[in-house]
């Protein structure tokens, strides 16, 4: 019985064709990033991480409008980093950069403000390597949102700040004046 069940299970391996970074930037396959010459599938999004992604996108966007700062907020939108193509979970583009790049397919640089919602399948070393990659590519501020630990780490070139439940996290450089209770964002 078990052997016949095992024989009937098919394992589907998704193999992406090899494409250059430039080809990825022109027409990126859905849910992929371009890392070290390979297409890497973005996965691991759970209902909780998706809810936090949606909530943060809405809060940043509403604040950009209500404060009069303008700009645009994106989710899962590609950008070029140092020799790679990434799709941050949430990102903000200033009005000046919106005007400069207009209707882009892939932003040719990092977004100034990025949030990565850390899923259970993410590895710490890879998350911090990606954070450094964003900073080297012009990103000014990154929020690492850790739903399971109930922490938010804000990273800039000059500092790394940790916010926990019961505290209020705020932007440090980009989208000045935005703040939210950690409990509200992670609820």
Image (cartoon, rainbow, N blue to C red):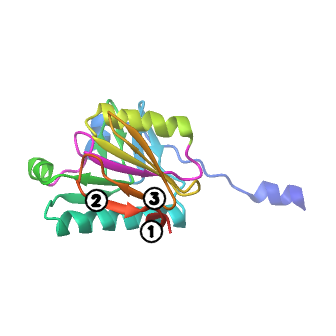
Q: CA distance from mark 3 to mark 2?
A: 14 Å
Could you tell whether 75 is left or right of 117 in the image? left
Prevailing SS of the magenta stretch: loop
Q: Are marks 3 and 2 in contact (CB under 8 Å)?
A: no
Q: Give the percent coordinates (x, y) of residue 80.
A: 29, 39
Residue at the spot of label 3? 167
Q: CA distance from mark 1 to mark 3?
A: 10 Å
Please tell me which of labels 1 and 2 falls first in the chain: 2
Q: Compared with residue 83, is residue 85 higher up or lower down, i.e. above or below?
A: below
In magenta, the rendered stretch is 103-122
Q: Is residue 183 visible?
A: yes
Q: Give the percent coordinates (x, y) of residue 13.
A: 59, 47
Residue at the spot of label 2? 178
Q: Nearer the viewer, mark 1 or mark 3?
A: 3
Image quadrant where residue 92 sits: bottom left
Q: Secondary structure at mark 3?
A: loop
Mark 2 neighbour density, 10 Å: few (under 14) some (14–19) many (20 or more): some
Q: Give the percent coordinates (x, y) of residue 154.
A: 39, 46
Q: Nearer the viewer, mark 3 or mark 2?
A: 3
- Nearest the viewer among 17 and 52 is 52
Q: Compared with residue 74, is residue 121 higher up or lower down, i.e. above or below?
A: above
Res 184 label:
1
């Amino acid at each position: 019985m078990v052997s016949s069940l095992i024989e009937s299970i098919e394992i589907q391996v998704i193999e992406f064709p090899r494409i250059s970074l430039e080809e990825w930037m022109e027409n990126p396959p859905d849910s992929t990033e371009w890392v070290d010459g390979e297409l890497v599938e973005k996965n691991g999004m759970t209902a909780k991480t998706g809810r936090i992604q949606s909530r943060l996108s809405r809060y940043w966007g509403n604040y950009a409008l209500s404060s009069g700062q303008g700009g645009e907020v994106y989710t899962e939108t590609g950008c070029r980093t140092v020799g790679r193509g990434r799709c941050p979970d949430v990102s903000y583009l200033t009005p000046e950069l919106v005007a400069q790049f207009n209707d882009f397919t892939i932003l040719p640089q990092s977004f100034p403000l990025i949030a990565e919602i850390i899923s259970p399948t993410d590895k710490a070393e890879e998350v911090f390597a990606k954070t450094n990659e964003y900073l080297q590519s012009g990103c000014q501020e990154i929020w690492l949102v850790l739903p399971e630990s109930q922490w938010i780490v804000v990273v800039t070139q000059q500092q790394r700040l940790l916010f926990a439940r019961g505290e209020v996290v705020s932007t440090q450089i980009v989208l000045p004046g935005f703040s939210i209770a950690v409990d509200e964002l992670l609820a």
